[in-house]
Image (tube, helix red, strand yellow):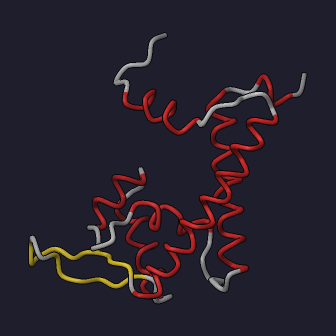
Amino acid sequence: MSETSTAPLVVLLKQLADRMVGELVARLRAAGYTDITIAHHPVFYNIDREGTRITDLAARAGMTHQSMSELVGALVDLGYLERVPDPADGRARLARPTRRGHAAIRRARTEIADIESAWLDAFRRAGLDLDLRPVLAAALRDPEPRT
């Protein structure tokens, strides 16, 4: 029995997520997006096409407003995002993908689909013939897992 087979599920899921994001970033770099890092993932994963307030991005990513603001600022400097007035509240601003940002997001969606497919194949080879997405989504909707 390997050491990982006795690891807590939270550790295994975190390792899986880290490997998937790492592979995604490597693929994006190979596709020419050499300035995207693993740290940028929470922004791209949580941003809406029409833009999102930094407060909402931070909440979705489980980060502080200050940390998310720094990530957004870096992505603005790199040309992936822009800050625009929020049409619903002129005092607020949205972080919105630029043309370059949308192109990177489209490429990332293609790459993550391939990465997920490869991992689902690995799960099948390991004996789990099941798409985990609906199972995980249903379990996450349960407000109180049974103990």
Residue 12 percent location from the top left of the image: 69, 36
Quarter of the image with the N terminus is top right
Q: What is the quadrant of residue 146 in the picture? A: top left
Instruction: Determine the residue positioned at 65% across, 65% down.
Output: 24
Identity of the residue drawn at 41% across and 75% down: 72
The extreme right residue here reads 1
Q: How many marks?
A: 0
Q: Nearer the viewer, residue 19 or 137?
A: 137
Residue 13 falls in image quadrant: top right
Q: Is residue 115 above or below residue 108?
A: above
Locate residue 66, reporting x and y percent: 38, 65
Judged left or right of residue 138, residue 130 is: right
Residue 78 rendering spot, x and y as whole percentages? 50, 88
* Residue under the image location 78 percent in, 22 percent down: 6
Closer to the camera, 69 or 142?
A: 142
Give the residue furthest to the top: 147
Can you give x and y, in whole percent of width and height, for residue 93 in the image? Answer: 21, 76
- Quarter residue 81 falls in: bottom left
Residue occupying image coordinates x 49% and y 73%: 105
For this view, does 84 lie left or right of residue 110? left
Residue 35 vertical position relative to residue 94 in the rendered view, above or below:
below
